[in-house]
Amino acid sequence: MRNIGTDSSTCANVNKNVASGRKTNDVDAITATNVDVSAGTGGEESAVLVNVGGRGDAIVFSNEVESVPSLDEESDDDDDEDSWNSESEDEEEDVDEEFDELFAERLRILADCRALKNLAEAFLHPEQPVKAIPTTFGRNYFDRPSAPAVMDDEDADEEAEILEDVENLKKAARAYLHPEVGVRVEDTTLFGRNYFARPSAPEVETFEEAEERAKILAEAAALKQLASDYMHPEVGVKTTDPTLFGRNYFNRYSAPETDEDEFADERAEILAEAAALKKSAVAYMHPEVGVCSEDATLFGRNYFERASAPDVESMEEAEEKAKILAEAAALKHLARDYMHPEV
């Protein structure tokens, strides 16, 4: 690219009527003058302004002043000006296209955001009616005849509160029935001492020990039930499964006759009274036999061993006394017979 500059010339003032970056003078005021075209520095090519009679100013290079006419020089200037204008127009068109693309992209993004916002509001608030353009028509999905019943906000809030209370009660019942399960804290800012893991807490069974204990208790209950069935065959078999069937051992055709409940109860009462009478008779006939108590929690004073009780003869002394009394009675009878022979 060549460096284009302007050197001083002998032409008149050309600062009037500037148009399109080029200087024009009044044609009537222009006169042809001699121009020194050898101006310049360092032997470089430089442009100078020359006066052309009747044709305005022209910009030519120093090595083309003598060979190029003024008209050709003006046409070259027009071509340069057209090329500069076309380049500036191309740049402006490129800038306009980029701006249009950015503006269209921005409009599409805003439209997508607006559509997403409307979709989120419709999802979070289904109770709100659908707002449509008057020119559009369609059936409301939520107000159709076959639509399920929709609760009001108050009913929905009340139902949510009830479900939350039920969940809390369920959690409290689980925590009460299973104290061996550790407390789970979701908030890391909460701190407190564990009641079950404190130093003074009693020993807690492990999960395996608790399961083993439950199995042992279940087996003991089954053995108790089996012993009860063996000791009380008169009690009917109770089953909770209606799909179970079987023959009753006690109601079979070859089974011996069984007393009814009333007769069995009356018989048991009679036997109990007979046992009590027998015990009373034994205690009356043998007062020397001590009272036997089977209940260790019963206490009482012995009538025969009380502090104010008379001395009780031993068995040998009682027998000796009885023999003496018998002999005395025999002697008395013998003396009566001797003294009264007429009797």
Image (cartoon, rainbow, N blue to C red):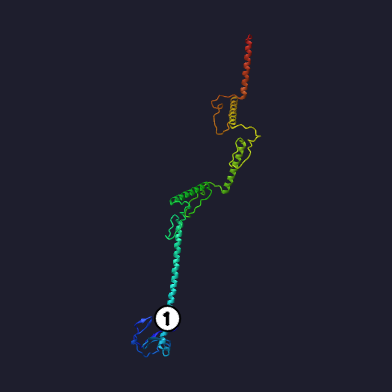
Q: Position of residue 49 (x, y in %)?
A: 38, 86
Would you place residue 202 above or below residue 311 in this image? below
Pinpoint residue 290: horizontal percent, then vertical percent. 59, 28
**Residue at the disc numbered 1:** 82
Q: Percent position (x, y) of residue 195?
A: 50, 48
Task: Kindly give the residue lying farthest to the top in the view shown.
Answer: 342
Left or right: where does residue 92 sit relative to residue 273?
left
Q: Residues within 10 Å of mark 1 (few under 14, many from 20)?
A: few
Quadrant of the snapshot with the N terminus: bottom left
Indicate the quadrant containing the C terminus: top left, top right, bottom left or bottom right.
top right
Residue 95: image x %, image y %?
A: 43, 73
**Residue depicted at 44% across the width and 64% down the height:** 111
Q: Is residue 283 left or right of residue 76?
A: right
Q: How many marks?
A: 1
Give the vertical position of 136 relative to 100 (above or below): above
Could one spot residue 200 in this view of the protein?
A: no
Relative to residue 335, is residue 27 depicted above or below?
Answer: below
